[in-house]
Image (cartoon, rainbow, N blue to C red):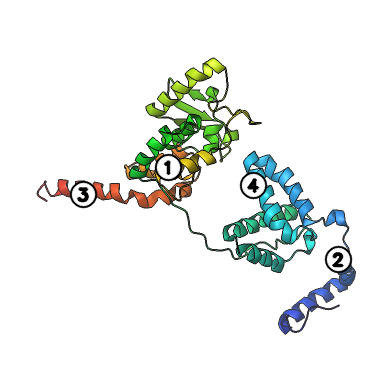
Amino acid sequence: MTVGLCSKVPLDKARIEARKLMATADLGQDPAAQRKEARTVKPEANPLFSEFAERWVSEVVARKNRAGTVKHRRLLLKNHVNPYLGKRRLADIDRRQIEDMHHGISQQYPVAANRAVSVCSAIFSTAMRWGMLERNPAADIDRNMEEGRERFLTPEELARHHPAHDASPAQDSADVVRLLVLTGARVGEVMAMRWEQLDLDLGVWTKPAATTKQNKTHRVPISPMAVTLLTRRREGAKKRQVEWVFPGRDSETGHMTTIRTFWAAVCRRAGIKGVRIHDLRHTFASLLVSSGESLAVVGALLGHTQAKTTSRYAHLLDDPLRRATERVAQIAAGGRL
C-alpha cells in the first residue's frame, strides 16, 4: 500500500501511518480492501453534494427556521456553492476544494464567500451526525475580514425623511416606514402584522414566533404615537374587514411583502444615500442608547436573545455616561465647578 507521496508526507508521519496499517493487518483486517471499498462506495451512501444539500435544507433547515431563511439557504447554495461542489460526491470533497470555492467566490462577493463556507460546514456536520462522514472538510477554514455595518439616521436626516414620506402617494408603505422608526421592528415583522396581535388599549404588540428571527413570541410595548397611527389604520380595516394591518393586493401571503421601490424613492427625495430599510432598526436602537437607555432595555425592545447582539451599540453610551459623570462631579464639588 502507498502511504503517501514522499514529496508531501514527512518521513516520521509516514512511519506512524505505516505502523497503523500494519497493526490493522495484524488484527486480521485488510486495510487495502477497506481503502478500495471506500473509493467504490455506492452512490446512495455517497450522494452528490447538491442532492444531500437539498435534503439538508428540507429536513434540517426547514424544520428549525422561517421560510425566509430556507429561501436564503437555497439561493446561497444555487448561486455560490453548487457551481463549485454540486456535482462532486459528498465524501470526495476535501479541504482544498472548500478553500478553492471560498477563494473563487471572494473575488466578487467576500461576505457571501464566508456564508458559503458556513453553510458547507453545517451540511458536513449533518452528514457526520448521520454517520456518512468521519470529518468536516469545511471546519476551521480561514474567512474574509468583515466590517460591521453601523449606519444610523441622524435626527436631521429623520427630519428630512418626514416630508418625503408625506409627499408620497403610497401612504401604506409610508406607514410601514413610520412604524419601523417607532418600534425598531424588522420590516418583515411589520408587514406581516395582524390586528389580532395588537392590543391598542394597552399599547402592546405580541409578535408570534413564526414572524420573529429568534423563533420566539415577542411581547413588546408600543408608543402612543404608534398606537395613534395603528388606530387610524384600524378604522379603514373595519370597513374592508381585513385581518392584516398592511394587506397586499397581489400577494400570495395576503399582506405586503416589499417596500424597496418606495424606500429608494423616499431616500432620493430626501437626499440621503447609503441607507437600507434595516438601518431604521439600528436608528431606533441608537436613539434609545444615546438618550441614556441601558443595553438591556434596548435588547428587550429589539427582541435580542443574546446580550452580545446588543453590545454593538455600546459605544453610543459614551455621551450619556459622560453626562452622568459630569453630574457626579458637580455634586461632589458642591456646585463650585
The mark nearer the N terminus, 2 or 4, is 2
Task: Give the vertical position of 148 relative to 266 (above or below).
Answer: below
**Residue 130 in view:** no
What residue lies at 45% left-to-right and 38% top-to-bottom? 184
Query: Residue 39 shows which numbered tag?
Result: 2
Earlier-in-chain disc, 2 versus 3 = 2
Residue drawn at x 48%, y 59% is 147
Q: Amino acid at mark 2?
A: Arg
Is 244 above or below relative to 29?
A: above
Closer to the N terminus: mark 3 or mark 4?
Answer: 4
Mark 2 surroundings within 10 Å by alpha-carbon count, few (fewer than 14), some (14 through 19), many (20 or more): few
- Residue at 44%, 45% in the rendered image: 268
Q: Nearer the viewer, mark 1 or mark 3?
A: 1
188 displayed left or right of 64: left
Q: Return the disc, 4 or 1, that comes first in the chain's sequence.
A: 4
Choose the circle earlier in sequence order: 1 or 3. Answer: 1
Kindly give the residue lying farthest to the left in the view shown: 336
Density class for disc 4 (Cα within 10 Å; few <14, some 14-19, many ≥20) is: few
- How far from the left and from the top, in percent, is residue 168? 45, 33
Which mark identifies residue 269? 1
| Residue under pointer 3 | 326
